[in-house]
Amino acid sequence: MTLNNETILDRINTFIDKEGFKVEHIANLMNKKSTTIYNRLKDSQSKSVSQFAIDFAEVMGRKRTFFIEEDFQYMPTVERDKEVIAFSSGKELSEEGKEALGKLNVVCEIIKNYSR
């Protein structure tokens, strides 16, 4: 089964949103203009969506086919890290603690993403 371009772009946009990336930063990483990236993220009619997905996956340090695999499974990094931290202490966090930890992780991920 071949994925349609709209599905691929939905996956990429979800990834960008959940990981906290800004298009300007992605453009910088890919050596492209921000307007080019914005257009690529919206244009499901383009013939080069699959190539953009491959290029973007490589820049993000993912497998080339990450966004175009049929069994695509994405779990935001922040959520996964939060669970690891919470359970490594051997104690259950309060709801307020979980919320605060989640916010702290988002800030840390944004800093990490922009320092790449």
Image (cartoon, grey):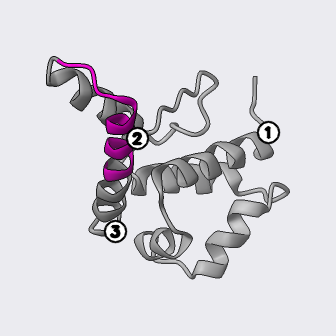
First in residue order: circle 1 vs circle 3: 1
Magenta region, main secondary structure: helix
Which residue is labeled 1 in the image? 4
Q: Amino acid at mark 3?
A: Tyr
Query: Against 92, is 85 above or below?
Result: below
Q: Residues within 10 Å of mark 1 (few under 14, many from 20)?
A: few
Q: Amino acid at mark 1?
A: Asn
Q: Are marks 3 and 2 in contact (CB under 8 Å)?
A: no
Give the number of the disc on residue 76.
none
Q: Are marks 1 and 3 in contact (CB under 8 Å)?
A: no
Front tag of 1 and 3: 3
Q: How much space separates mark 1 and mark 3, taking CA atoms? A: 31 Å
Which element type, helix, strand or loop, lies under badge 2?
A: helix
Q: Position of residue 76 (x, y in %)?
A: 46, 38
Q: Residues within 10 Å of mark 2 (few under 14, many from 20)?
A: few
Q: How much space separates mark 2 and mark 1, taking CA atoms? A: 37 Å
Q: Position of residue 85 (x, y in %)?
A: 22, 31
Q: Position of residue 18 (x, y in %)?
A: 52, 48
First in residue order: circle 2 vs circle 1: 1
Residue 92: say if magenta: yes
Q: Position of residue 80 (x, y in %)?
A: 36, 31
Which residue is labeled 2 in the image? 99
Question: Which residue lies at the image location 28% right of the left edge and 60% below the top edge?
Answer: 112
Which residue is labeled 3 in the image? 114
Q: Amino acid at mark 2?
A: Glu
Question: Which residue lies at the image location 57% right of the left edge and 53% below the top edge?
Answer: 17
Residue span colored magenta: 91-104
Snapshot quadrant of residue 98: top left
Question: Which residue lies at the image location 54% right of the left edge and 26% below the top edge?
Answer: 73
